[in-house]
Image (cartoon, rainbow, N blue to C red):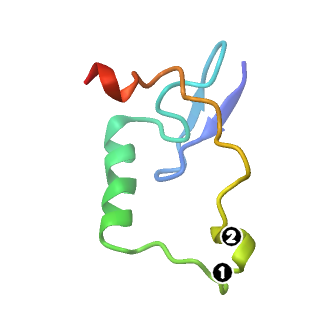
């Protein structure tokens, strides 16, 4: 059975089929811990950004089928 390690607590998560909706986390708690780290600016970029890093792609990515269109909100 395939598995991955949680990005926060390093717990091994086994799954069947496609990746779980919480990937790369093992639980909602770990997902919120990660969000808190972003909000407290604990993550940093370890190099200077180049123009390629901030230039948008030529064509937009395909819409995410899991998210409803903004018109439906």
Q: Residue at x 51, y 77 (%)?
A: 44
Mark 2 lies on residue: 53
Q: Secondary structure at mark 1?
A: loop
Q: CA distance from mark 2 to mark 1?
A: 6 Å
Q: Looking at the image, which residue sits at the far top? A: 17
Pointer 1: residues within 10 angstroms few (<14), some, or many (20+)? few
Q: Looking at the image, which residue sits at the far bottom? A: 48
Q: Are marks 2 and 1 in contact (CB under 8 Å)?
A: yes
Above or below 21: residue 50: below
Q: Residue 11 at what x, y percent from top left?
A: 53, 42
Q: Which residue is nearer to you in this view: 15 or 32?
A: 32
Q: Residue at x 64, y 42 (%)?
A: 60
Q: Which residue is nearer to you in this view: 39 or 7?
A: 39
Mark 1 lies on residue: 49
Q: Quadrant of residue 3?
A: top right
Pointer 2: residues within 10 angstroms few (<14), some, or many (20+)? few
Q: Is residue 48 left or right of residue 72?
A: right
Q: Is residue 59 left or right of residue 45?
A: right
Q: Which residue is nearer to you in this view: 48 or 69?
A: 69
Q: Residue 19 at what x, y percent from top left?
A: 61, 25
Above or below 72: residue 8: below
Q: Residue 64 at what x, y percent from top left?
A: 54, 28
Q: Is residue 63 left or right of residue 59?
A: left
Q: Residue at x 38, y 64 (%)?
A: 38
Quadrant of the snapshot with the C terminus: top left
Q: Quadrant of residue 2?
A: top right
Q: Which residue is nearer to you in this view: 13 or 22?
A: 22
């Amino acid at each position: 059975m395939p598995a991955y390690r949680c990005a926060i607590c390093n717990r091994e998560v086994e799954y069947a089929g496609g990746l779980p909706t919480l990937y790369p986390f093992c639980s909602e708690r770990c997902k919120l811990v990660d969000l808190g780290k972003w909000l407290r600016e604990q993550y940093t970029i370890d190099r200077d950004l180049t123009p390629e890093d901030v230039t948008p792609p030529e064509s937009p990515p395909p819409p995410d089928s899991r998210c409803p269109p903004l018109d439906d909100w």
